[in-house]
Amino acid sequence: MASLEIIIKKLIEKNGPISVEHYMDLALSHPEFGYYKTIDPIGTSGDFITAPEISQMFGEIIGIWVTLMHKQLSDNAQIKLIELGPGHGVLINDILRSISKIDKSPEKFETHLVEINPKLKRVQQYTLKDREVIWHNSINSIPPGPSIIIANEFFDALPVNQLVYDTGCWHERQISVTNDINQKLIFSSGPEAKEEQLPSEIIKERTEEGSIFEFSPAREKMVKILAKKISVEGGVILIIDYGHTQTAIGETLQAVKNHKFHPVLVDPGTADLTAHLDFQALQRAISNIGVLHWGPIMQSQFLRRLGIETRASYLRNNSNTQSGLEIQRALDRLIDPEQMGSMFKAIAITDDSSPMPPGFENCSYNKFINTY
């Protein structure tokens, strides 16, 4: 039995059932046994792989976007380049390399990384050993100033809460322990949900018994913090993640271990827990902050508009046959609708005086690809 599982069971024994959000928070961020505190989860030897690890092209294209965005904001002024949850540091490294080739002025960017995992921070320090980078445990410790904030597969890892439709109304879904010798962690139905917990269109909807609805105060709190920073100090937030464009009933909470699905309530702290991002919920959360919300658009649209197919063609033409096939497979994985192309989506958040960010309008930026 995992040590964290013992801690959770003792907590439930003492205080009663806990929320799904509390369970996720413990499983992911417990200071001693939390998944993101103890494990390097990324790559073929980890539990999942992210777009920057699939191909350098992803980071190079984001680098193009950052360069264009900087020109749009203020071409000459220094700006903070911030990545949330930077993994192995591959994405920010590719972004900075791309910037140096296009703009020739990387000193225009002051790079900040927000990371809570000590193991990943050490990997990032090695990956970025030749670059000037400042690390933070929280977005709140980054000095004020105009910022370009990148959040790739960051929001999906923030905890969600769940409601279950039971006996004709919505109840908080909780985690409890079976009352037998096995003492397994199980889902249970808790108190009736308060009306303010649900969008009005959901709470008025009659649905089937046992239906699940997910919402995330943690995600809404985070996007509000970021949006307020941008509204006051200037800049832009780019969020790329997998999820749905409209708030809807349905369960997406899942655990992944060794690139395979894993039971959500088994051995907490040893598997990655995520849930699909509700992009409409993010938009609602920032509706009164004084920022503009662009998208969501499919990842395939975003990357294509910024020239990823042209970049892939250039790399294939300058590689051997085997490398060319690998480049094509990576491209397909990033933009194919049956793979990451449609499930992953991009949104941008700007201050209320900014024009539409690059990639969100229907035009091409292929001219930048030839600078490599």
Image (cartoon, rainbow, N blue to C red):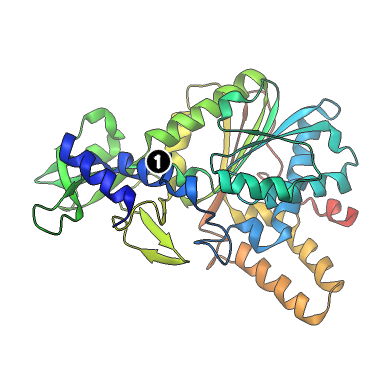
Which quarter of the rendering shows the C terminus?
Answer: bottom right
Whether residue 362 appears in this view of the structure is no
Whether residue 304 appears in this view of the structure is yes
Foreground pick, 103 / 204: 103
Could you tell me the amino acid type at mark 1?
Answer: His
Does residue 100 appear left or right of residue 204 in this picture? right
Give how far across and how far down residue 103 sits, in percent: 88, 41
Give how far across and how far down residue 195 sits, in percent: 23, 30
Does 309 appear above or below 229? below
Q: Quadrant of residue 85?
A: top right
Q: Could you classify mark 1 by the number of other residues whose Cα lies within 10 Å: few (under 14), some (14-19), or many (20 or more)?
A: some
Question: In terms of secondary structure, where does tag 1 sit?
Answer: loop
Which residue is labeled 1 in the image?
A: 30
Give how far across and how far down residue 283 sits, in percent: 48, 34
Foreground pick, 279 / 12: 12
Does residue 242 appear left or right of residue 91 in this picture? left
Foreground pick, 204 / 50: 50
Does residue 86 appear left or right of residue 22 in this picture? right
